């Protein structure tokens, strides 16, 4: 898939274009994108520019979003660098200058709640009324009686319900980061962990222990503040990779969350914690085996 930033877009044949923020590329987004040749999106998230105090935690970094969009067979991803100047454009200017002049859109696909232009004055009805291109307006998708939305998925992740979030995403929620040095307490307990520091801008599952895949290995992952010990380090993501030997410091680790095992809790003794960790590891192995059988 070709990735270009507006305005560095070459002259083109008229194409079908799906337009949206597409954070998470969830099942609803996939319906909008389906069968489109090009996808037009924004970076950073528009809310971070027009109302920074309400900036949402992102489900996907730009590179992960591009990866997911490419997996849908899209030929071209067009990224609009969203800033104050672009936010000040009127809805009519967005249609004229971007959809018609720059992209030569013959068909535009959006979700029914898509808004655009200064103060969000443009909507799907405005696009549908324009005769220079055809417009497909996709209704909001429901799964098991729930509207699929990025905000709902963020809430599920915060509550620790990664399995439900994955159902709406259409893929396992993923977090990636550089492995940093910890206090090596896991190593002393017999469970050496690869540690990530949660990024403020990204959504993260709530405190607890999770069954994950980590760079292809089954992994029991703890997110929280380690209440059994007084560490003073703040929130940390600790991944124990089953059957892995080696040093991951400084490397990139990608975690795919499959299911929550339990909440974070304080144990009276390190021995009680180790006994629970053994149970967590065995349950993780079972869940990863089930996941592999379904794939």
Image: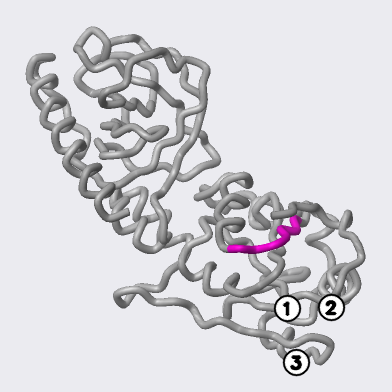
The disc, 1 or 2, on the residue closer to the chain's N-terminal end is: 2
- Identify the residue shown where x is 26% and y is 26%: 242
SS for tag 3?
loop
Report whether 41 appears left or right of 224: right
Depth check: give the residue in front, 27 or 147.
Answer: 27
21 is within the stretch colored magenta: no
The part of the image, by quadrant, that contains residue 248 is top left
SS for tag 2?
helix
- Residue that label 2 marks: 92
191 in relation to 93, above or below: above
189 in relation to 46, above or below: above
- Identify the residue shown where x is 34% and y is 44%: 257
- Identify the residue shown where x is 89% and y is 71%: 97
Real-space Cα distance between discs 3 and 2?
12 Å
| Residue 140: % across, % down | 48, 78
Report whether 214 appears left or right of 5: left
The disc, 3 or 2, on the residue closer to the chain's N-terminal end is: 2
| Residue 47: % across, % down | 64, 56
Depth check: give the residue in front, 242 or 82.
Answer: 242
| Residue 125: % across, % down | 68, 88
Report whether 35 appears left or right of 116: left
Depth check: give the residue in front, 121 or 82.
Answer: 82
Real-space Cα distance between discs 1 and 2?
8 Å
Visual colour scheme: one colour
The reply to whether dot 1 and dot 2 touch (C-beta < 8 Å) is: yes
Real-space Cα distance between discs 3 and 1?
11 Å
Report whether 135 appears left or right of 7: left
Q: Quadrant of the N terminus?
A: bottom right
- Residue that label 1 marks: 122
- Residue that label 3 marks: 129
Q: Give the residues in magenta.
A: 73-79
25 in relation to 137, above or below: above
């Amino acid at each position: 898939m070709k990735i270009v930033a507006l305005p560095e877009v070459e002259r083109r044949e008229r194409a079908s274009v799906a337009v949206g923020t597409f954070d998470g590329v969830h099942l609803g987004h996939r319906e909008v994108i389906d069968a489109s040749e090009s996808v037009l999106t924004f970076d950073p998230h528009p809310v971070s520019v027009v109302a920074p105090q309400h900036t949402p935690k992102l489900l996907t970094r730009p590179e992960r979003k591009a990866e997911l969009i490419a997996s849908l067979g899209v030929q071209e991803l067009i990224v609009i660098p969203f800033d104050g100047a672009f936010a000040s454009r009127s809805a009519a200017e967005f249609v004229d200058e971007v959809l018609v002049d720059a992209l030569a859109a013959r068909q535009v696909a959006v979700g029914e709640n898509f808004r655009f232009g200064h103060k969000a004055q443009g909507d799907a009805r405005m696009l549908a009324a324009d005769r220079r291109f055809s417009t497909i307006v996709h209704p909001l998708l429901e799964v098991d009686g729930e509207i699929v939305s990025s905000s709902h998925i963020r809430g599920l992740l915060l509550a620790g319900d990664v399995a439900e979030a994955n159902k709406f995403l259409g893929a396992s929620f993923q977090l990636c980061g550089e492995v940093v040095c910890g206090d090596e307490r896991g190593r002393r307990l017999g469970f050496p962990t690869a540690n990530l520091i949660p990024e403020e801008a990204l959504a993260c599952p709530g405190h607890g222990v999770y069954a994950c895949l980590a760079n292809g290995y089954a992994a029991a992952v703890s997110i929280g503040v380690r209440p059994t010990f007084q560490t003073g380090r703040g929130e940390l993501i600790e991944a124990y990779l089953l059957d892995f030997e080696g040093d991951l410091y400084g490397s990139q680790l990608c975690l795919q969350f499959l299911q929550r095992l339990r909440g974070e809790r304080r144990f009276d003794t390190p021995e009680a914690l180790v006994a629970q960790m053994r149970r967590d590891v065995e349950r993780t192995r079972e869940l990863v085996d089930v996941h592999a059988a379904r794939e």
